[in-house]
Image (cartoon, grey):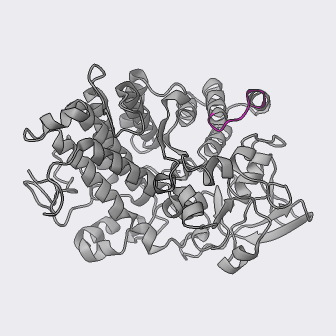
Amino acid sequence: MDYYPSPNSPTSPPSAAVFNNTVHSIVFNTRDEWFMGRFTLATMQQWQQSEYGDEDRFAYRESMRQYWGTFYSNLENLRIVIKLNEDPATMDNMLAYGANENQIACARIMMAYTFNIMADTWGDIPYYSYGSDNPNFQALQLAGETEVIYPAYATQEEIYTDILKELKEAHDQLDATKAGFKIGDVIYNGNVAKWKKFANSLRLKIALKIRSANASLANTHINEAVLAGVFTSNADNAVFAFESADKNASPMYRAWNVGNRSDFAISNTLVTLLKGENIRETPTGADLNTNPFPGLLDPRLEQYAEVNKDGNYVGMPIAESSAQAAVIKYESLPSRANIIDKPDYGIVLLEFSEIAFTLSEINAWDQTHYVNGITASMQKWGVSAPDIAAYVASVPAANQRNVLTQKYIALYMDAHAAWTDYRRTGFPDYLVKPGQNYTVYDPATTTYHPFKLNAIPAEITNDLPKRMQYPAYEFTLNGDNYLDAVAKLAGGKDNLIAPLWWDKN
């Protein structure tokens, strides 16, 4: 069987090479200066742009929507990994890279990971399933025995239900008595037991997300995933580590040091939160937002950011124009040592701290899981043991606001997950909202600089975006199905404010 429609492509490539290249592309393109830097990091006020300002105010460029095509290209390559390990003509040759069933299961997990991000971004999308014959799952059918040029958009309920099933089946398919990927697995280096935990932990995360939409389905998967075994320490974290050479360096290192970009700074919202301070509405007015951790300096601040030219930590505001952003000079950059000048930075797909906070929520805001989440996050970022102990001894006790705000802090550099949590829960409630006035304090000049978050899209009035619009080429290339998907959105328009199926907040 020819897995590549192009006659110039190999018909039987090494599955390990395809898997490695595909996972690299998935990780790089979801965490680069565009999809994360100008989209989710800016939207969730963890970074802001220091040269431009439109995306910070939710005017997302068409090129950002077109990551859609990159996602599907990567998903097709994962499908090829599966087919290479199933086809009698190639499966024996693929044993050189690991047991067939383990390669298939890892590809299924990465498919679930990718489709989850896509559905969380757009809503209904064309979907492919390895283990389901649902006629609505029509994506990735341009090669082989069937051909679907105009795939239908599956509903979010169908997609998430199948993703959870896929993760359960992939976990069960993984056989720890046989070899995992012998090469090409940068995340776990072929450790099948770790892949099992990753499948369970991702399943737990997704199940919690949909609990308000389908409690019965969610609780079944939550209970099964925890029983099967989720992350228990940072040693379980799913991390894609890049290399020290520029060619294979991390995306943010390449943006700064290869692309010569310097477009971002850590946000005023996050810096103020980590300092234990409130955001003031006007220089002489009331506090806009109250800090859940008043007066408590978070030691992660010096791991997340650099001091500015005056030796202070000052966050970047959401500028009211690109021209305004370009003349602001008091902002702090993201950490050079830990992020922007670290070519071998390890991008975390899913980590123990997120799972610990998830377990705290599931268990009625449990204190032990809450502390575990804070501790794991600080340990991952290199905070000293005495500083961790001092912070944990002082941090307010677990409740909904505190747990979810600490989760937001821990999800620094995984802003898409933070955006999903915000839409699901409304936390952190510390963020600046559209239409609000706020100030940024510069201690070097003892000056409060006033700003207002004026959203650019007309439909954004008092909250953050709920989704990203579909790429414009979908109307041209798959118009009928695109229009059908748009008609199902709240309000029947392809805009930023239509809530997703699980967004009941």
As drawn, which residue projects farthest toward the top? 177
Q: Residue at x 42, y 41 (%)?
A: 206
In front of the other: 87 or 373: 87
Q: Would you say 373 lies left or right of 188 here?
A: right
The image quarter containing residue 139 is: bottom left
- The answer to whether residue 73 is left or right of residue 297 is left
Can residue 433 be seen here?
Answer: no
Image: 233 above or below 23:
above
Residue at 40% across, 72% down: 493
Indicate whether residue 208 is drawn in magenta: no
**Viewer-closest of 232 and 234:** 234
Establish if 368 lies above or below 94: above
- Given residues 62 and 57, the one toward you in this image is 62
The vertical placement of 315 against 359, above or below, is below
Q: Residue at x 78, y 69 (%)?
A: 329
**Residue located 37% across and 47% down the image:** 23
Q: Which residues are magenta?
A: 380-387
Q: Position of residue 266 (x, y in %)?
A: 69, 57
Residue 382 sits inside the magenta stretch: yes
Does residue 458 appear in the picture of this structure?
yes
Quick one: which residue is furthest to the front in this view?
245
Residue 310 on image: x %, y %: 86, 60
Residue 273 is situated, as x and y percent measured from the top left of the image, at 74, 49
How many circles with numbers are drawn on the protein?
0
The quadrant holding residue 490 is bottom left
The spot of residue 31 in percent (x, y) is 50, 54
Determine the residue located farthest toward the right in the rendered image.
446
